[in-house]
Image: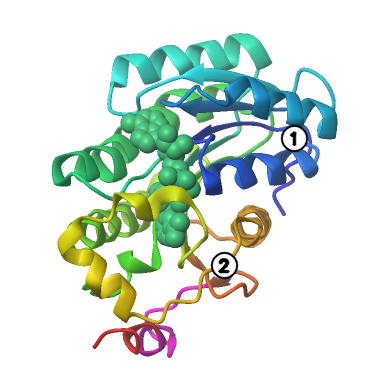
Amino acid sequence: MFDVEGTVSIVTGALGGIGRELVRSLLSNKAKGVALLDLNDAQAAEFQASLEKEFGANKTLFLKVDVTDLENVKGAFKKCVDHFGNLDIVVNNAGIIGNIEMVIKINLLALIQISNLAFFDYLPKYRKGNEGVIINIGSVGGLYPFHILPDYCASKHGVVAYTQALGSNVHYQNTQVKVMGLCPGGTDTEIFKGVPEYYQQFMKDTDHAIQQTEIVGDALIKVLKEGSNGSIWISKNSEPAFEFDYKSETLPILLKHVS
Ligand SMILES: NC(=O)c1ccc[n+]([C@@H]2O[C@H](COP(=O)([O-])OP(=O)(O)OC[C@H]3O[C@@H](n4cnc5c(N)ncnc54)[C@H](O)[C@@H]3O)[C@@H](O)[C@H]2O)c1
């Protein structure tokens, strides 16, 4: 079983609603350090101070990074290993709803580029243990036709497909890096502020249970500990995370939301 204790992670979108809980979960499971990558630095110092109070000094490194700028991302990976000495886990969490081009660039293209950087260059070289791990944050909207946000849905289907393909064991044999996906359902964050006007009426008409961000933080640890390479996990309706299985009744359950 993968052990978070002593590991170093990079989390993108770390200052967002879900990102903050992912970071807290890693630190509360005795991670050695977490590099917090985010475009938004407004509350970085405050967030780091609260983590220091809760988990002790020198556990985090904030790096202002636009995930769509690969050179910027490469610089951040280097700073992370220079600072902490190792790198074991990369969580691609940055994501938006809104401008179509940015949705594809941030949610899918950047996630693929960062995964490749982690998979081929960093995790095989800098992990402390036998395995490195990449966790890609998808969405339940990446598992069924989520009519409320078609472009976001397309980007997240791409995340799931890419994660399963890179998570094939033929790749694992070469790198000993696991690649897994975690798909949250509706979660209480600021992301819905980006919903374009036309789609807002569908949001109002849909009965979505909104969970608290802590649920996704707990789900991350479950996936890290129990997940097999290429597996896709769901964290929704405040339930413990469970693995998505195309062959089981999971898909019809999700499709019930489609009207
Ligand atoms: N909240 C939900 O209901 C929900 C459901 C399913 C999936 N998700 C996914 O969870 C992830 C986190 O979303 P959230 O709900 O916490 O949203 P959020 O808006 O609270 O946080 C997103 C974070 O990403 C950062 N970010 C945006 N663009 C960036 C860029 N170019 N470079 C670096 N950082 C950037 C933002 O500054 C922000 O801190 C996303 O991938 C989202 O698609 C969220």
| Residue name at image x 62 percent, y 75 percent | 239
- Residue 221 vs residue 51, the one in the foreground: 51
Disc marking residue 211? 2
Q: Quadrant of the N terminus?
A: bottom right
Q: At 20% from the left edge and 65% from the top edge, which residue is drawn?
A: 199
Q: Secondary structure at mark 2?
A: loop
Residue segment shown in magenta: 243-253
- Figure quadrant, ligand 1: top left
Residue that badge 1 annotates: 31
- Viewer-proximal residue among 38 and 33: 38
Image coords of residue 159 (percent x, y): 31, 53
Q: Which three-letter amino acid code belongs to the residue tagged 1?
A: Ala
Inspect the magenta stretch and tell me whether residue 9 lies in it. Answer: no
Q: Earlier in the sequence, mark 2 or mark 1?
A: 1
Residue 62's label in the rendered image is none
| Residue 154, picture quadrant | bottom left
Residue at 50 percent across and 76 percent down: it is 209
